[in-house]
Amino acid sequence: MKEFRKKYDVLVAGGGVAGVAAALSSSRAGMKTVLVEKNIQLGGLATSGNVFGYLPLCDGQGRQVIFGIAEELLHASIKYGPGDIPGDWENPESVSRYSVCFSPAAFVLALDELVMNAKVDVWLDTVICQPTMNKDRITGLEVENKSGRGIIEAKCIIDATGDADVSFRTGVPCEERDNFPVIWAFQISLEAARAAVHENNAGKLLDLVWQGGSDIGEGLPPGLRKYLGTNGKDVSEFVLVSRKLLRDYFVREQAMMGKSGRDNLFPVALPSMADFRTTRRIHGLKTLGSSDFFKNFDDSVGLVADWRGPGGSRKNVWEVPFGTLVPQKIHGLLVAGRCISATGAAWEDMRVIPAAALTGEVAGIAAALAVSNNTTPEDIQVKDIRKEMDRRNILYSLDGLHGNV
């Protein structure tokens, strides 16, 4: 027996940046929207994972590529904490980008404010158990929280879990990728405190320590393996091994300081979720691949710039096809964030904060259209999505960029 049953127009699964953007987009479009998150704070890896860099909205050539809620969230990330947008990012000769570093806790407060003002019904500390289905159409999610286990029904559902958990459990074909251990944490140090006093800027106290490997394993001690973020045992070992790397770091650094080591350098904030880069992604109606940068798509619904490298050292810009947000086989479902249908270098660019926010907003627009037209996402006319994006001043075609690409 289920303890409760609720009905909404749109259900967003996952309260990371993609999920927040999707919920804001849907609710602002007039949909009765619920956002379900297993943790007690919004923001996903940006906040719970301590990944505190809001990567660029520009192409490194002085051109803004991403607009809309993604830009709104960038400004929200520094509303209650330190951080400044570089004043010279619009100069093509500059190495600066339209990006910021932020305090994760301050970002949480701003995200709360945004979803509350948008009248999104937020369910925190709520675990998604399994989908409810009517043949090949998803109709809701079975969830569990302190009230017990119940059903949330919705006319359209957005999978923003980051791991394609909802999609996978409905039977959508998916692809998995493993990761080397890595951890983002914050430390308190006497050195940072002195810098803060010297520069009269408490933002200098936001002292990141990063341990582990790059996406190709650079920086790792020999002998460490990769882990799947979709395997329960692997997740536990990934977290423990990553925290051991951090523990070893503090042992080394404190020992070099002598007796005062423990007082002058110590950890202050660990991530409350595993810092996986990529885990599981869907096979969508279209897949964005490594060679698809600067390529036009007839169903493009957004632009994403390569975030890697300073300034113009990387100039790739991607059009994002709507088909990458629509899973194969299952109806009534959209996907947003790092689990959209992208592979290779495209997956690396689609997994980060600005791209997650963009695809979240698009998913929210599409969900609202599907509900309004009493249809499912794959039957939505892309021209209708673009009409709403035009109204929101969001670019979706390379032709819209000023200057040559």
Image (cartoon, grey):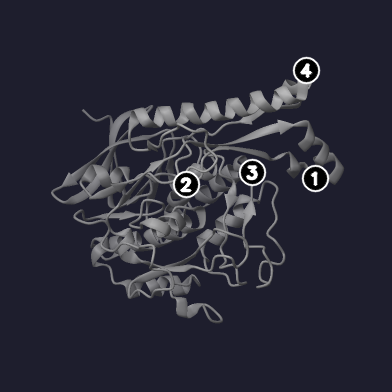
* In this rendering, the label closer to the viewer, 3 or 4: 4
Amino acid of disc 1: Asn
Q: Residue furthest top?
A: 259
The CA distance from mark 4 to mark 1 is: 28 Å
Question: Do labels 3 and 4 touch, CB within 8 Å?
Answer: no
Question: Do labels 3 and 1 touch, CB within 8 Å?
Answer: no
The answer to whether residue 124 is left or right of residue 289 is right
Circle nearer the N terminus (3, 4): 3
Q: For the residue labelled by badge 4, is the local secondary structure a helix, a strand or a loop?
A: helix
Q: Name which residue lies at 48% across and 72% down.
A: 395
The CA distance from mark 2 to mark 1 is: 33 Å
**Residues packed near mark 2 inside 10 Å, few (<14), some (14 to 19) or many (20 plus):** some
The numbered disc on residue 201 is 1
| Position of 365 relative to 180 (above/below) | below
The answer to whether residue 274 is left or right of residue 331 is right
| Position of 238 relative to 195 (above/below) | above
The number of numbered badges drawn on the structure is 4
- Find residue 285 and report its image quarter: bottom left
Which of the image's four quarters has the N terminus? top left
Q: Residue furthest front?
A: 222
The CA distance from mark 3 to mark 4 is: 31 Å
Amino acid of disc 2: Asp
Circle nearer the N terminus (4, 1): 1
Image coordinates of residue 313 in percent, x first then y, are: 58, 65
Question: Do labels 2 and 4 touch, CB within 8 Å?
Answer: no
Image coordinates of residue 39 in percent, x first then y, are: 45, 35
* In this rendering, the label closer to the viewer, 4 or 1: 4
The residue identified by callout 2 is: 215
Amino acid of disc 3: Ser
The residue identified by callout 4 is: 259
Q: For the residue labelled by badge 3, is the local secondary structure a helix, a strand or a loop?
A: loop
